[in-house]
Amino acid sequence: MALEKKGKINGLHGSLSQSNELAEEQLRKTINELVATEENFVKDIRKLVDQYLKPTNLPILQTAGRLLRVQTSFLFALRDAAGDVVHKSDVPPEQLRDSLIRVSTLFINKCNKFKIYSDYSAAYLRFQQNKKPNRETEELLNKNNLSGEQSDSAQSLLIKPIQRVLKYPLFIQQIKDNCLNGSVEKQQAEQALRRMHALADYVNEMQRITEQYGPIIDEISMKHSAETHMNLSELLMFANVNWLNYTENRSRPVACVAFVFSSLIFIYCPSLSKHKNRLYRILPINEIEVNENITNSKESQILFVLIHIKKSQETIYHFCCFDSEIKNHFIKSIRKAAAASATANSTNNTIADV
């Protein structure tokens, strides 16, 4: 009986050992595939920039160039984090675990840099919209396809960044699924996965804003000076609000969309805007005061006032948010932008005095 029990225990240990070996092998494959595909991705983006975008000087060039710099830096860091796992097939388990932790930590630390994908998605959308009526651009891009292969075409290369950012969570998911429960490497992978999912939500939301409001923002920006230029890459937050004291419509609130950029607040009212006569306000951050405590009533939790101070003139805007959390985030974003603007102005004044 004792021998039978011992045999079962040995069989269980053998099964667990075999399972761990299979998991470690899968982890090695995942890291190798991640690094190899990243190398190919960087090569593709470099080809896109050098072979297609620089010769044509398309507007998307600037964003693609920034993306190339971010991804080149990420590739160097990724190779360093992976270490010998990409060169040897027999690295010890401890070394594999260290590599897994470093790779997950790299994604956590670089996640904020990957917001460049939001800018690229917006630039790609504008490129697609502008390309359709422009046959000259399409013909020039086709001419620059030296191999003639569809996989080397500008269109194929342009979509690769959007495809790539969607693959990162899949790699991290594979790492998480093959790590031991409760291990440090699994916890790091879970944290990295949460950050990448949050990034995907951010990119998707910015894509929606670009599609819905990008053309309007671009149109209005062109009508004003460079100081009031609006770039969605500098957007801190946006929210649907009600404008309570619009002078020409005092009987009921006006539904608006409020955007807080790093240098200004943009208030846009779709319901009262026509194609050639849009209702909006542009309020420079350094000319704004915020009053969030209007009354002691429950309504004060969702009400706030913006005071636009320009020279000796003041214009007061009363707004209502849909809940207190949106209001708090909105005001926090305004104050963050104001603090950054004050710091920048102080630095510029110091440089000017030197």
Image (tube, grey):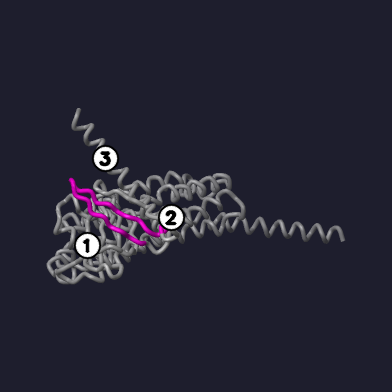
Q: Which residue is mark 2?
A: 296
Q: Is residue 46 left or right of residue 57?
A: right
Structural crowding at the residue carrying mark 2, measured as other residues with C-alpha within 10 Å and reported as few (<14), some (14–19) or many (≥20): few
Considering depth in this image, is 259 or 87 the residue closer to the camera?
A: 259
Q: Which quadrant holds residue 53?
A: bottom left
Q: Which residue is mark 1?
A: 280
Q: Is residue 314 left or right of residue 100?
A: left
Q: Is residue 160 left or right of residue 296?
A: left
Q: Position of residue 292 (x, y in %)?
A: 37, 52
**Point 25% across, 66% down: residue:** 269
Amino acid type shown at disc 2 = Asn
What is the CA distance from the residue labelled 2 to the residue labelled 3? 36 Å
**Point 22% across, 59% down: residue:** 281
Residue 104 appearing in the image:
yes
Helix, strand or loop at mark 1:
strand
Q: Position of residue 251 (x, y in %)?
A: 28, 70
- Residue 208's disc is none
- By secondary structure, the bulk of the magenta-drawn segment is best described as strand
For the residues bearing labels 1 and 2, Cβ distance under 8 angstroms: no
Structural crowding at the residue carrying mark 1, measured as other residues with C-alpha within 10 Å and reported as few (<14), some (14–19) or many (≥20): some
Helix, strand or loop at mark 2:
loop
Amino acid type shown at disc 1 = Tyr
Considering depth in this image, is 26 or 310 the residue closer to the camera?
A: 310
Most extreme residue toward the right is 1
**Point 57% across, 46% down: residue:** 92
- Residue 221 magenta: no
The quadrant of the rendering that contains the N terminus is: bottom right
Of the two numbered discs 3 and 1 in the rendering, the one whose residue sits closer to the viewer: 1
Q: Which residue is mark 3?
A: 344
Of the two numbered discs 2 and 3 in the rendering, the one whose residue sits closer to the viewer: 2
Magenta segment boundaries in residue numbering: 300-320
What is the CA distance from the residue labelled 3 to the residue labelled 1? 27 Å
